[in-house]
Amino acid sequence: MSAKPLGSFTFVLHAHLPYVMAHGRWPHGMDWLNEAAAETYVPLLDVLTELIEADRSPRLTLGLSPVLCEQLADQNFKAEFSEYLDRKILAAEADQQTFRQWDRAHLSQMALRWRDHYRQVKENFENRYGRDIIEVFRRLQDEGYLEIITCAATHGYLPLLGLDDSVRAQVRVGVESYRHHFQRPPRGIWLPECAYRPAYKWSPPVETSVLAKRAPRRGVEEILAENGLEYFIADAALLSGGKAVGVYIDRFEALRRLWSQFESQYREKPEDREKSPREVYLVGNPVEGKRPVAVFTRDPSTGLQVWSGEHGYPGDGWYLDFHKKHYPGGHRYWRVTSAKSDLAEKDEYDPDKAAQRLPENAQHFVDLVKGILREHHQQTGKKGILCAPFDAELFGHWWFEGPQWLRQVLDKIDRDPELELTTCARFLDEVHPVKVISLPEGSWGKGGYHYIWLNEWTEWTWKHIYEDEVRLAALLKEFGQSMDRNLQDILTQAAREILLLEASDWQFLISTWSARDYAELRLVEHHQSFQRLADMAEKYGRGEHVDPGEWNFLGECHRRDNLFPFLKLEWFLSPEITPSGSRPG
């Protein structure tokens, strides 16, 4: 038995949903948030609480996107979530009556399980966690059980944004949102889609007359350093070359078709064996007077084992099938059966059989982690880290048994003397990296580039984004030194609309065809709202008459898109341009 651990391990779970408050309910809208809270966020709190009560230390790295925090902290969500859970309980009871009439005893019992399941979720949300998911996560961080990291404000796809000021605003709002909710500065950030761009003379990827070609752009890491952030996470293919493995392509047929259009252009980079995902590096040239930014690397082999619905654990035939649902309530009563089974061939779900598969799957993952870290230790004599990033919603939402699998993995690793549970910040403090490297542009999409977010279906979205970015910058430059309270109010709401417009979710939903109409409507809505507010700002700022209907429209925007109440316009400005009476902060 080792006196010292072979290496360290951390899950990095990234929790994020686009802003859906006051933007529809079902099938697209508020029920996305309700589903994620019921199936992932509350179960994740349950897992952490159970481990702590069992005297374990979960040491999880958890990313909570600012736009998600805003929604989970909203009083309207807290009230509506309880109502949603009531609807799920009633739907299960209705299913039970239906199945009993059909003489389907097993399905009838399953319906009662769903009833009890949602009753327990409601009990935990309302009483165990005091209806405040964000507050409980904050407390767990303060007690040292996990580390929470931030993200860009609305999950904007940073490499493709048209202006450095837009990247700066997404990051700055993310930092300030974190301070607002967790009463401390963040140390790490999850770059949306793990997408990174170094400094170079950049040209917009779509035809536009509003942006210059080959304009110098700052590296993303420089803007992170400006905001006091210490590290981010990148895909292994960006670090050391090799094949860029997509995390979404198994789940969306539209992405497989889209990838076929780009596959011939893809050239796998030669693998650089001098760089290891087990090490932490510093990236690029640090900003003068700022600490350089570190990068942790996604482990590819363990990632595929968990992500893949075809080759990974979620594809086990005994686990609950995600796609087949019983309507109108939407509860699921069937198991995966096999990776190739169509919906008509799904067998009934047996929760006891599913639970029996978890220990084997959890132990297999732990053995895989240990083998990778042992190999690194034998080759280098050093304790490396295995960083395992996943979308948090995989656990519970996509993969119903995922939270209990997560609990067993964390428990097994915490008990294993050859392994050490850690967080990214804790490991960073321990190793003090000194080697500086450069990273190419890319993301964690298959092929490692931008095709999921930039393709023939989404080019038009970037034209609107670029137009609005440039117009906001011009308005702030024109009125920055002479802005009264009313004009600040108009432009602050316009800035909110741009942040919402920039969300990478819209391009993702368009490319996957999973909620394409909704994404297109949302994107157009925020673009049109911004343009109308910009027109209003121009009139008011130049002393022209503003109709009462325009002020009513501003009030409507306030009520509908009221996130980030602490937003400041100087965060959207180059440092040398600030509104009158304010300073860069």
Image (cartoon, grey):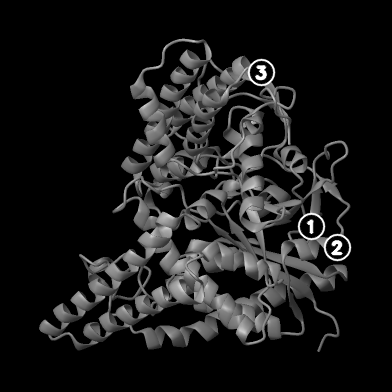
Q: How many marks?
A: 3
Work out how far the residue at label 3 is from the one at label 2, CA to CA, in angstroms: 46 Å
Mark 1 surroundings: few (<14), some (14-19) or many (≥20) residues within 10 A: many
Q: Tell me whether the residue at label 2 lies in contact with that at label 1, contact meaning CB atoms closer than 8 angstroms.
A: yes
Query: Quick one: 545 or 4, which is closer to the camera?
Result: 545
**Numbered mark located on residue 431 in the image:** 2
Helix, strand or loop at label 3? It is: loop
Instruction: Say which quarter of the image contains residue 79.
Output: bottom left
Residue located at (26% from left, 80% from top): 111
Q: Amino acid at mark 3?
A: Gln
> Picture quarter containing residue 45?
bottom right
| Residue 289 place in picture, x, y as percent | 88, 39
Q: Foreground residue, 139 or 34? A: 139
Name which residue lies at 42% across and 12% down. Answer: 545
- Which residue is labeled 3 in the image? 481
Residue in the image at 59% along x and 27% along y: 162
Question: Dividing the image into 4 quarters, which one contains the N terminus?
Answer: bottom right
With respect to residue 265, does 233 lie above or below?
Answer: below
> Visible in this render: residue 299?
yes
